[in-house]
Image: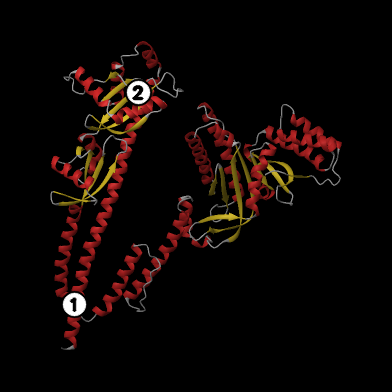
Amino acid sequence: MGLKAKIFTAFSLIVFGLLGLVLYVTTSQTEAFEVERITRQLGFAQARFQNRLDDQRRHAFTMVRTITSDQKYRAFLGQMKDNFFSFAEEIARDTGSDLVVVVDEELEISGVSRPGDSRADMTAHTEQSASAVTAPHIEEIFSEVLDTGKGVTRVVTLQGKLVNAVFVPLQESVKDDYALGVVLAAQTINDSWVRDLLGNEVDELTVAFYAGDKAVASDASAQNRQQLIIESVSGQSNSVVLQTERHIALKTEFEGAGTDAGYVVAGNLDRALKPIAKLSRDILMIGLGILAIGLLITLAVAGRIVQPIKRLVNATHHVIDGDYSYRVENPSSDEVGELSHAFQNMVEGLQEKEQIRNLFGKYVHPSIVSGLIDNPDDLALEGRHQLQTLLFSDVAGFVGISGQLDAEQTVALLNEYLGEMTAEITKADGILDKYLGDGIMAFFGPPFTPGNHALAACRAALKMDQRLAQLRDVWIEQGLPPIRARIGLATGEVIVGNIGSEQTRDYTCIGETVNLASRLEGVNKYYSTSIIIDAGTRDLVGKSIAVRELDIIKVLGSDDPIRIFEVQALADDQTTKQKDLADKFAEALVDYRAGRFMEAETGFEELAKAPWKDPVSDIFLKRCMMYGMSAPKKWDGVFAMDKK
């Protein structure tokens, strides 16, 4: 066989092999992709169904609770203790429930809503309802509500149907921990409910709700819905066959329904693969036609082109799978070589940007992440010394506040507080480092905070204090305890970098400045102030922030004296009273530091009284009185803190 024939034969085999491999990989990977896509879609559908059930019960429970708590109901309860039929009808109408049953403490029926069919006999309907609510699982729920005085919401079986039900206690007072009766409000899960839920996906998904081994609601035909239940409930696989077509199914069970109950949602796999099957046939036919022509034209260059391209295709699959470390080696200088080089540069850029997104995307403002992606050299993951302004905030007396609330109220209040405070930090281009229980640690500085980071941190602190004052008024109106916070700011050199173990790392700051900011937050407690900054922060903000110099102190754990300042307001927002207070306090502070305690006492005494009533001046007044009687031997004006 001649060389031309060998090349021709080898090329033909390669092309046929590649074509077959592409079809095989396309078919197999597409099916796996479709199975994953349908499974993901089914998961979303499950979540939507559960949300619909939860929202429906939550709405019904709130409506019933509201109706049974208003003055009209109280008067009704006092006048008609044994006949709640009209009351049940009112609840059914207001909540859209298909059935409302009211029972007393003895589990005797006191009221039943009218049946949906106006021609139905009310007596027979009442007897059927009485029989239904005597089922063991229903009686058990009634007893639980009567004993605890707390409502129950769940999906249960009732009269052979699957219903979304709420059990609401009837109480003379909402503070009672017992109930005088129970209201059962139920909405039937039927075919129309399922079709409404599916909406635009009615042609893509098949859903069947079941109770026992019977389908009670579905968007499918009677045969398909029952077959879906039989194969899904009793089978071990998530694959079912309906009318010769394969489906992927996911099952959800309802606990405490009284019998085996739940729902199955399925997606048609064969229908999803039909376009792919046709595409594969088209690819095969087109490929064969092109092969016939290409064998004659590309024989001379096949070996030079195919291999580099295959390497690029392989590299593309690696990138699709998230492997950005894969490299393409092609030393040739032709177009394919240039393409390989360009592809390699692209992958390296994607790897760098993906690293930044993974590290900062969850806790840094998106605009900042975009800036880091555009200028990755500004970010030092390995750690570097930088000048930063640290902010620590903490809720005053949070242990006492949480003791006044139950767990859910405490978490809700804390989440609202942290969310609003974090929003103010983010608006000022600050970076939330972490939450410390009810405390917050944040930092301001390059490359995240443009311009004067100390000024940005002070602006954020003032905004946090103002926003908390607004929230405090709202919380007081809601009967919640008021929250007050203390904020400490310090500016200095810190080590910034990606710190942690191999498994978990945080981009954070460490150093003495971090410790100082934390200590200054606690110093607020001693001086009864809200925002304290150190001298480093004061020097950077200049005259943009109105401050009052408080003291020279040694914080706990440090022998170095530091000057501290109280932040009053933005310079343009400082009131006359704030300025006069700062000036008078500064005059008295000069005498205090010079050891002229009697003169300082006179100045602080004036500020401690009306109209000033300054708590800081009161602290210094007591110091002067003490030092006046027993002056320190070596007076340097420094006060040592003995608490955090």
Side of 215 where 445 appears, left or right: right
Q: Quadrant of residue 186?
A: top left
Give the distance between the C-alpha atoms of the residues marked 1 and 2, in whole angstroms.
Answer: 79 Å
Closer to the eye: label 1 or 2: 2
Q: How many marks?
A: 2
The image quadrant where one finds the C terminus is top right
When the figure is inspected, residue 559 is found, relative to residue 127, above or below; the finding is below
Q: Nearer the viewer, residue 560 or 591?
A: 560
Residue at coordinates 17% horizontally, 56% vertically from top-left? 274
The three-letter code of the residue at mark 1 reads Leu
Quadrant housing residue 322: bottom left
Amino acid carrying label 2: it is Val
What's the residue at 28%, 76% (across, down)? 307
Dot 2 surroundings within 10 Å: few (below 14), some, or many (20 or more)? many
- Outermost residue on the bottom side: it is 2
Instruction: Give 600 or 207, whichever is nearer the viewer.
Output: 207
Rate crowding at label 1 as few (under 14), some (14 to 19) or many (20 or more) other CA atoms within 10 Å: few
Q: Position of residue 73 (x, y in %)?
A: 37, 16
Q: Secondary structure at mark 1?
A: helix
Quadrant into which the N terminus falls: bottom left
Mark identifier at residue 13: 1
Marks 2 and 1: in contact by CB < 8 Å?
no
Give 162 or 118, whichever is nearer the viewer.
162
The structure residue drawn at horizontal position 78% and vertical position 40%, both measured from the top left corner, is: 589
Label 2 SS: strand
> What residue does disc 2 label?
182
Residue 107 percent location from the top left of the image: 32, 21
